[in-house]
Image (spheres, rainbow, N blue to C red):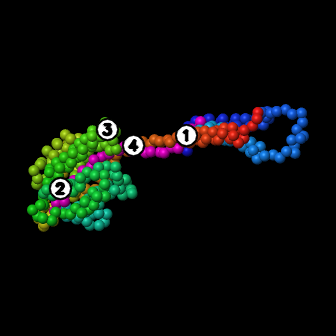
Amino acid sequence: MQFYSPWMLLLLLLLPVLAFVIKRKKLYARIKFSSVDKFAACPVSWRIRLRPAMLLIRFACLLLLIFALARPRKGTVISQKSTEGVAIQVVLDRSGSMAEQMDYFGRGLNRLEVAKRVLTDFIRGDDKDLKGRPQDLIGLITFARYADTKCPLVHAHDAMLEFMNKTQIVQIRSEDGTAIGDAMSLAAARLRKAEEELVNRRLRLGIEDDDDFKIKSKIIILLTDGNNNAGEYQPLEAAKLAKEWGIKVYTIGIGSPASKRSGFFGMSIGQSLDERLLKAIAEGTGGFYGRADDAKSLGKIIEKIDELEKTKVKSVQYTHFAERFGLLAFWALGLLMIEIILTCTVFRKIP
């Protein structure tokens, strides 16, 4: 509660002065008598005893009017947030080679599991360097020979993380492979579609510039340990399409490019990580390429992406005021009416 015109409360200082003047000057009607001795023994009626109350009612009326002039009002703080966030499409390799062991801070986990844990810290935060991405749109696409949308771009990250945690290494041999181009094309299309839907929603609502969420930038985070050996689209063609749509691609190569190892189905795999391709994709779209040999190096790459792709949250606060002077003015008017009625009836006096 506050007063819009608190300086009006200075009028309260006039009330004691007015009371003093009334008492000192005896500003009420009088009749002169030569002697009032004969009236001294007369009983005093209750009307005479209560008549000073009329003056108190008048002062109460003035008091309420002064507070009404000061305009008391009650404010309610309303906060409105506008987010300029990042639309992030995570593209995660789940081919058979991702079953290869990788160091996770002293523990041996497969590459897919390490990637999932580091990405979870990126999205949810790790209470250290990563603060999480609560304001961003994040979606998940996984791929082996075929690319699948596991989770569309959403703000509800718990649902997205649940889908990611349930992602497993491909189990069917005929579905194994690495379709980088298809996965990137699908991710770019999802990002473009999400942006179009936001624009269409603003148009339907008649909003030109202001919205609860605006896409500040669109990015793809591609994690793979292989080279493109399946799918319809070539990775560089998909990268060209992403650049045309204003999408940056951050590529992360998992494992050593020169290692020879066995895949999930026991097949011998030679130099599977195509670093040259991943660098070309990243550089052509404005992103960067990083190689991760363990969880620590993967975490450093994710931290760099997190630092580069900042989300801006603008909070606008304003106060809605409800005026309270009307009630005071109503009570002041009521007291004045009561005083007038009583002085004209019960407490009427002559002269």
What residue would you read off at disc 3? Answer: 207
Q: State which tag comes first along the sequence, 4 or 3.
A: 3
Identify the secondary structure beneath mark 3.
loop
Q: Which residues are magenta?
A: 69-97
What is the count of numbered marks? 4
In the rendered structure, find residue 148 and report the number of the disc placed on it. 2
Tags 4 and 3 touching, CB below 8 Å: no
Q: Is residue 222 visible?
A: yes
Residue displayed at 56% across by 42% down = 327
Dot 1 alpha-carbon crowd within 10 angstroms: few under 14, some 14 to 19, many 20 or more: some
Dot 3 alpha-carbon crowd within 10 angstroms: few under 14, some 14 to 19, many 20 or more: few
What residue would you read off at disc 1? Answer: 326
Kindly report which numbered mark, 1 or 2, lies closer to the viewer in this rendering: 1
Type of the residue with mark 4: Lys
How far is the residue under mark 4 from the one under mark 2? 35 Å
Residue displayed at 23% across by 52% down = 152
Tags 3 and 1 touching, CB below 8 Å: no
Rendered location of residue 235, percent (x, y) = 15, 48
